[in-house]
Amino acid sequence: MDSNSPRLNTVQSTFQTYFGKYETPTTTLQSPLPPEPLYSAPLSYWSIAKKGILDVAALSAPFLLIYSIGRFCLSKIAPTVAPRPFPLKVTYALNVLIALGAYRIVQAVVGFPVHPAILSWLKGEENLQLYDQLRSLQTGKQMMRISARSEMGHRIDGVFIKNTGVDLQGRCLLISPPNEELYENILDSFTELSTELKANILIYNYAGVGRSTGWFPNRDAMAASHKAMRGLLEELESKEICDFGWSIGGGVKWQSHAEAPPENPNKYVSIDYQTFRSVANIGYQILWHFGSWGVSLLQWNYDNERAIKQSQCGCIPIDCTGDKLMQEGNRPTEIEKLNESKIVVERGRHGSPLDTATISEIAIKVNAHFSNCVNVHLASAPDNQDVTENSSEGLHREDLPISQNDSLQQAGDQSVSIDEHLRNCQELD
């Protein structure tokens, strides 16, 4: 290696070595467990401890409850053989433990309709045969099975797909799946979009879903799954990241951004397909105020609207007029900030994949977004500054993949912009 060449980190060198001598990875794609993590996020000890305490309480609560009921019955039927009561302080502690356990059990039960793919292990191995799902995508694409360890210690399973003509560190489409799906089953829905965007793909399963590890994960674990994938792309130094969330995937993605905003928001654009303003709003639609309050109390509320308003990343929300699940008042396209960037599809229903016309419209808006950010940055640079000095920011024409330089010529003068985000770009500069 040239002594003047930049030193590669572990993620970069692993990717370059793998794709430099690429062979169809049949064995790793079919393996029951993900490979060793390429990236490990710093552990969040508070999140781990909080979930651990609640899990222990949930496992203990039924036995404590059975013991308490049994002792009470024996004290009435045969007082002489009934166990002696616990001291008062111990009784209080056990009651708290039972209450925490009941909370965690209800939280897990409510988590099933929010993330039903948690129970994907019940469907059997046929849903986990990744190679059978992907071999039709071999032409023009190269796949690498990857994993990353989240801040909660879960191993998150995923696949990186390199598109023909796209640099490893070029534009990447990061996909957060809908609530009932494994990535193995929906990848073919995104190949046309990745081709149109001229982007690589990184798609993953949430903690506890498919072959990602995790036991009855909570919202923290779901958001940590996305943060782990973001961290991997940051280590790879991807220059542009199209952060795609489908249905509940939009909630997971925005929860991740709310908890850990990107250091460089200019390299991100969020694409929200058939998602919602808030899960609490869906709870309200079902059970009025009790449903909204319950979702929030059980920490299953993904408040996308709050995260979108706080974010400095661009956002492209997409609605289908036939989507009856996302009722009026709960659609991101209704947020005033997103009026200029929204896409409303006059067809489709909840769960329907992207069609060709929508894919083309997404590509136009994404290309215009990134080219406008580049133009704003270049326009604000001092006259005597060499723009190549800050190439690590990923905001300059000469640093973008060839495919994206083409898009700058085509979309540089378009006004299909995300106005609020451009103002943020100017403020940052």
Image (cartoon, helix red, strand yellow):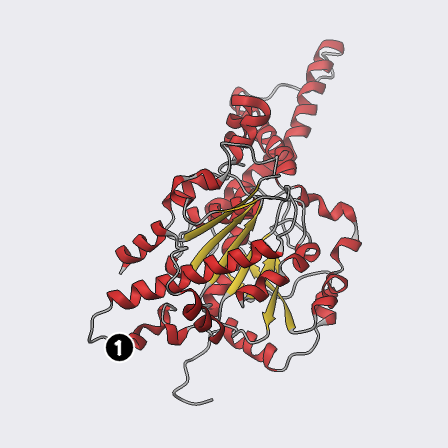
Determine whether, in the image, residue 36 is placed left or right of residue 316.
Answer: right
Determine whether, in the image, residue 112 is placed left or right of residue 381.
Answer: right
On the image, the x and y values in percent for residue 192 come to 62, 62
Q: Tell me the SS state at disc 1.
A: loop
Q: Quadrant of residue 107?
A: top right
Q: Quadrant of residue 194?
A: bottom right
Which one is nearer the viewer's eye here, 414 or 1? 414
Determine whether, in the image, residue 375 is placed left or right of residue 7.
Answer: left
Extreme residue in the bottom direction:
2
Q: Which kind of residue does numbered mark 1 sit on?
A: Asp
Q: How many marks?
A: 1
Which one is nearer the viewer's eye here, 333 or 310? 333
Residue 331, can we see it?
A: yes
Disc 1 crowd, CA 10 A, few/some/many (<14, 14-19, 20+): few
Which one is nearer the viewer's eye here, 98 or 150? 150
Would you name the residue on which mark 1 appears? 386
Residue 152, can we see it?
A: no
Which one is nearer the viewer's eye here, 233 or 346? 346
> Is 344 placed above or below 38 here?
above
Residue at 54%, 36% (x, y): give it. Answer: 300
On the image, the x and y values in percent for residue 286 come to 59, 26
On the image, the x and y values in percent for residue 155 come to 60, 57
Determine whether, in the image, residue 105 is placed left or right of residue 77.
Answer: left
Q: Quadrant of residue 164?
A: bottom right
> Is 350 placed above or below 88 here?
below
Residue at 64%, 73% (x, y): give it. Answer: 142
Residue at 26%, 55% (x, y): give it. Answer: 427
Residue at 69%, 73% (x, y): give it. Answer: 139
Name the quadrant of the C terminus: bottom left
On the image, the x and y values in percent for residue 203 come to 60, 59
> Is 61 placed above or below 180 here?
above
